[in-house]
Image (tube, helix red, strand yellow):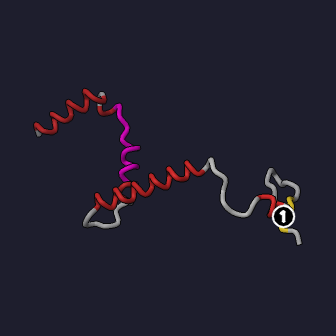
Amino acid sequence: MVHLLVHLVREIKLCGPVYLRWMYPIERYMKILKGYVKNPYRPEGSMIERYIAEESIEFCSDYMTSTNPIGVPRTAWLNKFSTSKSIRGVNVVTKDR
């Protein structure tokens, strides 16, 4: 029990009284990390692999927002579709025959 008291004193010095802290964001993040575990025999390794994959995808998606997409040029398909009148702020696009 002495061990717990030592850690509680340190936590109070660092963060203030326990009732002034909110653990909800940390608990939610722990749930996300728990979902990363696919191999129960090596949970740390699978969590790290999934976390790195998620961070890589997030970085690439942020990096790619400033570039032009590869594909059919906009002018090639723009004339094949017509836009009807907007209904409540929504434009309806239909294919011309």
- Of 61 and 43, nearer the camera is 61
Q: Residue furthest bottom?
A: 97
Residue 8: x %, y % from top left:
21, 34
Residue 19: x %, y % from top left:
33, 33
Q: Against 60, is 42 above or below? A: below
Residue 68: x %, y % from top left:
67, 53
Residue 73: x %, y % from top left:
75, 60
Tell me which segment is drawn in magenta. 20-32
Q: Against 25, is 53 above or below? A: below
In the figure, is residue 4 to the left or right of 83? left
Specify the quadrant of the image occupied by residue 71: bottom right
Question: Which residue is drawn at the image coordinates 55% and 48% (left, top)?
Answer: 62
- Of 7 and 59, nearer the camera is 59
Q: Residue furthest left?
A: 2
- Of 41 and 75, nearer the camera is 75
- Considering the numbered disc 1 on the image, is that residue within a helix, a strand or a loop? strand
Q: Is residue 56 magenta?
A: no
**Type of amino acid under label 1:** Phe
| Quarter of the image where the C terminus is located | bottom right
Specify the quadrant of the image occupied by residue 53: bottom left
Question: Which residue is drawn at the image coordinates 37% and 38% (left, top)?
Answer: 22
Q: Which residue is mark 1?
A: 81
In the figure, is residue 63 to the left or right of 49? right
In the figure, is residue 53 to the left or right of 9? right
